């Protein structure tokens, strides 16, 4: 009887083409769309005015270009002010004529940095230039003012730095996708369909007809949980398949681990919405409650922005949120690709969802619905 109820409910849902489109397929494609729109990291544009056009000035430019999230472009001296004003470049770096000669003759090197808005990018570039000038000055002091010897020694020095970097610095694992927060939020909204469906069953007397056919209340609710869990997993599955086809980078060797994390998280989404149903019988109220709770949880969890920019007190609250655990799971998988490293979080999410199920069933029993 339970299997028959599940199959009949699935057939009923499949007849609703709008539900399949709006409830499963469209949310997944929306998240994929935003992956392309906002998932690519922004590049800060730095305009370079190289009046010296020397080997040494080119070394400075290469060091700036190697900075993460920085894109350099050569500009004319007469143009950099208007480019800054129109925000076509964030920062302008002006290397004066005679930079290399001053370097070889142990004189002060003059590099000016201009920007409209003072920010961390300008500060990082300034620090980098100072450090690079110190390195070049050290090499110049050993080159006896000979430019050829300077080039040779600087090449050897750069090779040594590259070797140290390969040996001592861990691989730079890509950060979590900017749209993971949107995916987490979408799953909660999609899982809200269980609330609407159960309330609609009550309003249309469908639940009463099912129960009068011999199905007990426990089987009814278990079948609904099973069906809508599969539905939320379909949304995750569609997102995953489309992402793989479009080569969206998960930042982990085994992207299938993403599905495992989301499979556990979907349990929380379903149990949370079932809990809402047990306390309210209004579709409008259930939707509002869902959003009013989920949005602050996502905000405190740091899935919409960098978690580290929040105050420590808010971080302590955020660390208790299951939405934060999902973020940490994926971030951990990006760093070491080891599923055992996130077992604690997966178990915690399962316990949390079981707790919500218990609260839901207890409230339904109090309402004489179980």
Image: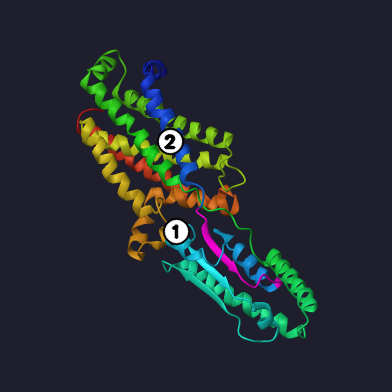
Marked residue nearer the N-terminal end (1 or 2): 2
The foreground one among 116 and 199 is: 116
| Residue 189, above or below 1 | below
Report the magenta residues as a range. Answer: 42-55
> Could you tell me residue 46's position as x and y percent?
53, 62
Q: Nearer the viewer, residue 309 or 12?
A: 309
Name the residue: 40% across, 23% down. 20
Q: Quadrant of residue 104?
A: bottom right
Pointer 1: what residue?
Answer: 87
Q: Please give the name of the residue rendered at 47% of the width and 65% of the height, measured from the top-left corner.
A: 81
In the image, which disc is placed on residue 161?
none
Tell me: residue 220, above or below residue 80.
above
Q: For the residues carrying marks 1 and 2, which lies nearer the camera in this image? A: 1
Query: Judging from the image, what secondary structure is the residue with disc 1 in?
Result: loop
Specify the quadrant of the image occupied by residue 14.
top left
User: Taking 210 as reference, is 57 left or right?
Assistant: right
Mark 2 — residue?
30
Q: Which part of the image, by quadrant, shows the C terminus?
A: top left
Image height of 133 relative to 364, above or below: below
Other-residue count near label 2 (Cα within 10 Å), few / some / many at <14 / 14–19 / ≥20? some
Q: Tell me the residue at 29%/12% (across/down).
A: 213
Is 46 within the magenta? yes
Residue 237 is situated, as x and y percent measured from the top left of the image, at 50, 32
**Is 30 placed above or below 201 here?**
below
Residue 166 in view (yes/no): yes
User: How many numbered circles does the render carry?
Assistant: 2
In the image, 145 versus 68, the foreground residue is 145
The quadrant the N terminus occupies is: top left
Is any atom of residue 231 visible in this view?
no
Question: Is residue 169 found left or right of 308 in the rendered image?
Answer: right
């Amino acid at each position: 009887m339970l299997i028959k109820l599940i199959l009949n409910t699935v057939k009923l849902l499949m007849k609703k083409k709008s539900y399949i489109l709006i409830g499963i397929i469209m949310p997944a494609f929306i998240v994929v769309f935003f992956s392309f729109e906002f998932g690519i990291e922004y590049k800060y544009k730095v305009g370079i005015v190289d009046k010296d056009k020397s080997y040494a000035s080119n070394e400075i430019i290469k060091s700036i270009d190697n900075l993460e999230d920085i894109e350099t472009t050569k500009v004319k001296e007469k143009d950099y002010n208007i480019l800054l004003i129109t925000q076509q470049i964030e920062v302008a770096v002006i290397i004066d004529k005679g930079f290399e000669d001053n370097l070889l003759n142990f004189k002060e090197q003059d590099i000016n940095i201009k920007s409209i808005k003072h920010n961390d990018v300008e500060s990082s570039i300034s620090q980098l230039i100072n450090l690079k000038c110190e390195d070049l000055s050290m090499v110049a002091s050993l080159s006896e003012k000979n430019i050829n010897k300077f080039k040779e020694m600087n090449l050897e020095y750069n090779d040594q730095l590259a070797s140290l970097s390969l040996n001592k610095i861990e691989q730079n694992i890509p950060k979590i996708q900017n749209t993971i927060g949107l995916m987490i939020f979408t799953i909660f909204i999609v899982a809200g369909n269980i609330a609407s469906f159960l309330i609609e069953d009550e309003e249309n007397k469908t639940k009463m007809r099912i129960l009068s056919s011999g199905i007990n209340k426990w089987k009814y609710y278990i079948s609904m949980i099973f069906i809508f869990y599969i539905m939320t997993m379909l949304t995750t599955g569609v997102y995953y398949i489309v992402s793989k086809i479009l080569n969206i980078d998960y930042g982990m060797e085994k992207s299938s681990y993403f599905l495992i994390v989301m499979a556990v998280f979907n349990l929380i989404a379903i149990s949370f919405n079932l809990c809402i149903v047990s306390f309210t019988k209004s579709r409008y109220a259930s939707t509002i409650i869902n959003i009013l709770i989920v949005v602050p949880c996502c905000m405190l969890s740091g899935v919409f922005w960098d978690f580290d920019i929040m105050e420590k007190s808010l971080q302590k609250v955020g660390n208790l949120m299951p939405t934060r655990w999902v973020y940490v799971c994926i971030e951990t998988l990006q760093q070491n690709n080891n599923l055992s490293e996130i077992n604690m979080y997966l178990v915690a999410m399962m316990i949390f969802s079981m707790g919500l199920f218990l609260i839901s069933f207890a409230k339904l029993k109090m309402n004489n619905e179980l």
